[in-house]
Image (tube, grey):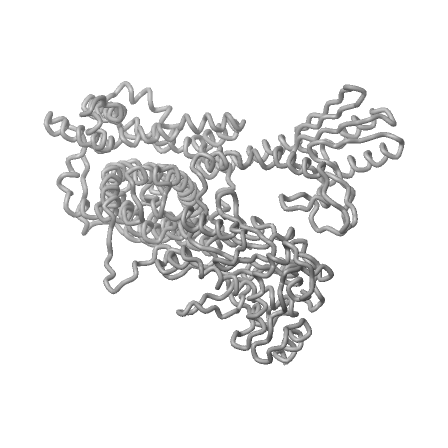
């Protein structure tokens, strides 16, 4: 179950919704326009260069760039990712064109797009992220090496061979037959590409705003035109003769392999690029405010649609491109309009700038693509895989892609990654030493059945009756290792020895619990770190248990949250919701809302009560929290959460007029309006997921949530924010025994609630459950909550029980039960 604040969205809070009002116009932010121009200036020469490198018609690169911008930009799930012909697809496409021809390659692109749409429908996008980064980086590096070797021949004035090996073998002959004009244009292009980002001074800063790729190609074009060098140039044929796809011709297995390769490369590259774009957006100065995170399945569908359209129009395969996406994010784009506009600029250039494009020298484009290929062998990636000890996986994948092919290289990388993982799983160090009269056994690594013989030998060499400390430093222990440790521990203790487990302790098998490992919300008495004891209501948490829990946090959880908490410490808290709930120990707020540090501003009190303004009687804590959350933190919503078996509600039901006045009873009088509301004939009784509550206590728990929301509206700051439309109120009920959350139906125009709590579906937002399908709680009486007293401990200072507004008689539990039965009948 995932409940993310705000629990319910009002129409004015829906993401990407048009502004309310009679005049609705399509508006484009100025940042999107400027970002689209910057991306266009980068994409235009790169698209031509990639088309040249694949051997496809040069127009195919422009088609893919336009379709990637417009189609993938409109339907994709990553708003700021820019798609188009990618350098990572150059080798694959070149091989398909050489083997099957251009028209069949276009058909293969269409089939690959359909395959991506199918994978998106199956929602397997996140499975692509399971591929080791070392394999992905190795694949891209291998493709980059292959591209660079092929384009080097064009830079030198020759023609590339069909494979990377042939290009290496033919390089000495090519060096003896260098074309001076082509080499000069290429050298000028490479020099400008490398020096342009490093131009010094104020003038250099202004020039650096022009993309390096555009500046280099433009300078090379001008130099070739002014000097009259005889070099081959771009030749864009008429669009009327543009080649469209035909029926696939060739062996079925070969075409299927081509479809699989394009599907794999485009999908993995696009999804990883989308994740990287999310990180870049979050790192911007505005923290990506207003830019939603990528929806990977939708992004996969958008890439599939783009490939279908691109292939059908005679374009190259399309994928998310990191270089253009980085430029889009860096230029300050705020929506998908920038991506779509860049595609529109490509279309206009392809139609109106053909004479200018025909002046570009082919060696300049080859040099541009060669530099891109070299940059795909990233030093940052190599350092990363070295730090994570995955150099072997990276090297094997790179070598396999260069020497054999992409699919084969990736398969080799996966095989090596699996072997490395198995080796690490079996690499367990077991040492033994004696210190301070105790024998210490250290186990470093994962404990699997392969390490059991060495572990058993080390343990049985310890003398009987000795004090032993076993230190486990690993995150995995299989059943064989567990049984070995458990049996030895029982035997050693039985012979008078003492055993202490650190790192991860061994508990007695617990047949009453369905989970064998300790989660962050596991109760202390069920922790694997200690022995299980039967539930004893008189048992109290000891200081040792608290210190042990803190120690587990410092060891296991703190390393995972330290960076996020450090960020919150620097930036301060900015919660989106005030969450007011009961102090009941069974309500773990972060668990039932799937929230983390900085998400919720939480207030807990007995009975989740909100005193009316002016009724606090010296206790302003709740009012102060509301004022601080609404006025200072500017939360977007407030949720009041009640729960089943609330001891405070039971105390209200069983209160006696002559009970002694205590602080608890003085506090609980703020719940009297809830009791009156339940007894009133003018208010509908609360229903839970299409049924009546199981008993009077549950009825009061539900009614109390509705009543406290009414109290909340009486606060001036809350009423003002509600009138402005910048704050929403929500009611929630958590059934402890069912582990099921329910949300209160939205209020009507008069701000009156329907008093109906709908079940929250496991997949996300609230969906009403029919009475036939709802599994209500049992009718057995609920036990008092630790947050409130039991029915045998009546609270004080509740003047008299509230009276029924029709009979004038005091309300008693029996009257409410009778009313419940009559209403149900």
Whole-percent x, y for residue 255 in the image:
41, 48
- Residue situated furthest right in the rendering: 495
Q: Is residue 234 left or right of residue 92?
A: left
Q: Is residue 355 above or below residue 817?
A: above
Q: Quadrant of residue 459?
A: top right
Q: Nearer the viewer, residue 200 or 213?
A: 200
x then y, percent, for residue 771: 58, 72
In front of the other: 330 or 321 = 330
Q: How many marks?
A: 0
Name the residue nearer the viewer: 320 or 749: 749
Q: Quadrant of the C terminus?
A: bottom right
Q: Residue at x 31, y 37 (%)?
A: 330
Image quadrant in which the N terminus is located: bottom right
Residue 258 at least partly seen: no
Q: Residue at x 18, y 24 (%)?
A: 181
Q: In the picture shown, does residue 318 fall above or below 436?
A: below
Residue 404 horizontal/vertical position (percent): 45, 33
- Residue 782 placement: quadrant: bottom right
Residue 168: x %, y % from top left: 37, 24
Judge left or right: residue 299 versus residue 370: right
Residue 308 in view, yes or no:
yes
User: Observer-nearest residue: 39 or 56?
Assistant: 39
Task: Report whether 483 appears left or right of 267.
Answer: right
Tell me which residue sits at (19%, 49%) in the image. 239
């Amino acid at each position: 179950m995932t409940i993310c604040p705000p629990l319910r969205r009002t129409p004015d809070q829906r993401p990407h919704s048009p502004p309310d009002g009679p005049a609705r116009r399509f508006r484009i932010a100025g940042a999107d326009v400027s970002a689209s121009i910057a991306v266009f200036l980068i994409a235009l020469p790169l698209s031509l260069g990639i088309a040249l490198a694949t051997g496809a018609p040069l127009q195919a690169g422009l088609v893919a760039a336009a379709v990637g911008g417009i189609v993938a930009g409109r339907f994709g799930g990553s708003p700021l990712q820019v798609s188009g012909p990618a350098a990572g697809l150059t080798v694959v496409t070149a091989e398909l064109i050489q083997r099957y021809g251009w028209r069949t390659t276009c058909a293969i692109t269409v089939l690959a797009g359909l395959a991506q749409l199918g994978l998106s429908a199956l929602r397997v996008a996140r499975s692509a992220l399971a591929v080791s980064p070392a394999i992905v980086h190795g694949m891209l590096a291998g493709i980059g090496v292959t591209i660079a070797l092929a384009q080097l021949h064009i830079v030198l004035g020759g023609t590339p061979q069909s494979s990377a090996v042939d290009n290496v073998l033919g390089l000495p002959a090519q060096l003896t037959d260098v074309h001076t004009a082509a080499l000069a244009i290429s050298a000028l292009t490479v020099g400008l590409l490398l020096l342009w980002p490093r131009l010094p001074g104020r003038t250099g800063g202004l020039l650096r705003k022009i993309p390096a790729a555009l500046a280099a190609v433009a300078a090379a074009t001008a130099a070739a035109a002014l000097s009259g060098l005889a070099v081959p140039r771009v030749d864009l044929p008429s669009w009327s003769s543009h080649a469209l796809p035909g029926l696939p011709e060739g062996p079925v297995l070969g075409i299927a392999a081509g479809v699989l390769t394009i599907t794999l490369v485009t999908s993995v590259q696009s999804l990883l690029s989308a994740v990287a774009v999310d990180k870049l957006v979050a790192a911007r100065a505005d923290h990506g405010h207003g830019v939603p995170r990528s929806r990977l399945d939708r992004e996969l569908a958008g890439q599939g649609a783009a490939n279908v359209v691109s292939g059908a129009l005679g374009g190259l395969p399309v994928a998310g491109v990191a270089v253009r996406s980085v430029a889009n994010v860096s230029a300050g784009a705020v929506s998908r309009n920038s991506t779509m506009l860049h595609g529109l600029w490509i279309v206009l250039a392809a139609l109106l700038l053909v004479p200018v494009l025909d002046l570009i020298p082919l060696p300049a484009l080859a040099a541009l693509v060669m530099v891109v290929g070299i940059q795909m062998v990233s030093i940052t990636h190599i350092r990363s895989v070295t730090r994570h000890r995955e150099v072997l996986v990276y090297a094997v994948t790179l070598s396999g892609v260069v020497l054999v092919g992409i699919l084969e290289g990736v398969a080799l990388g996966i095989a090596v990654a699996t072997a490395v993982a198995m080796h690490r799983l079996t690499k367990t160090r077991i040492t033994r030493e004696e210190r301070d009269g105790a024998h210490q056994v250290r186990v470093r690594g994962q404990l699997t059945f392969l390490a059991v013989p060495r572990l058993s030998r080390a343990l049985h060499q310890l003398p009987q009756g000795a004090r032993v400390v076993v230190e486990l430093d690993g995150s995995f222990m299989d059943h064989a290792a567990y049984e070995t440790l458990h049996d030895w521990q029982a035997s050693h203790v039985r012979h008078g020895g003492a055993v202490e487990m650190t790192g991860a302790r061994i508990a007695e098998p617990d047949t009453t619990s369905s989970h064998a490992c300790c989660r962050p919300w596991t109760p202390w008495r069920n922790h694997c770190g200690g022995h299980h004891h039967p539930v004893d209501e008189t048992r109290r948490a000891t200081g040792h248990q608290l210190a042990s829990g803190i120690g587990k946090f410092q060891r296991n959880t703190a390393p995972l949250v330290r960076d996020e908490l450090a960020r919150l410490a620097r930036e301060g808290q900015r919660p989106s919701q005030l969450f007011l709930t009961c102090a009941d120990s069974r309500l773990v707020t972060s668990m039932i809302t799937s929230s983390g540090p900085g998400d919720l501003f939480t207030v807990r009190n007995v009975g989740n009560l909100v005193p009316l303004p002016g009724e606090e009687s010296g206790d302003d804590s709740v009012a102060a929290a509301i004022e601080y959350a609404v006025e200072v933190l500017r939360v977007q919503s407030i949720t009041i959460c009640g729960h089943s078996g609330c001891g405070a509600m039971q105390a209200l039901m069983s209160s006696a007029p002559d009970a002694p006045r205590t602080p608890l009873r003085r506090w609980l009088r703020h719940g009297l309006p809830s009791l009156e509301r339940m007894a009133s004939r003018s208010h509908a009784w609360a229903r839970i997921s299409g049924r009546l509550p199981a008993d009077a206590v549950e009825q009061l728990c539900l009614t109390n949530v509705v009543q406290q929301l009414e109290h909340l509206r009486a606060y001036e700051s809350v009423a003002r924010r509600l009138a402005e439309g910048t704050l929403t109120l929500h009611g929630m009920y958590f059934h402890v025994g069912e582990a099921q959350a329910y949300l209160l139906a939205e209020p009507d125009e008069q701000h009156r609630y329907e008093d109906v709590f709908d079940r929250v579906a496991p997949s996300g937002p609230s969906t009403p459950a029919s009475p036939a399908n709802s599994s209500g709680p049992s009718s057995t009486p609920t036990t008092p909550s630790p947050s409130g007293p039991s029915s045998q401990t009546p609270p004080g200072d509740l003047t008299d029980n509230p009276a029924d507004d029709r009979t004038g008689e005091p309300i008693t539990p029996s009257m409410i039960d009778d009313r419940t039965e009559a209403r149900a009948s």
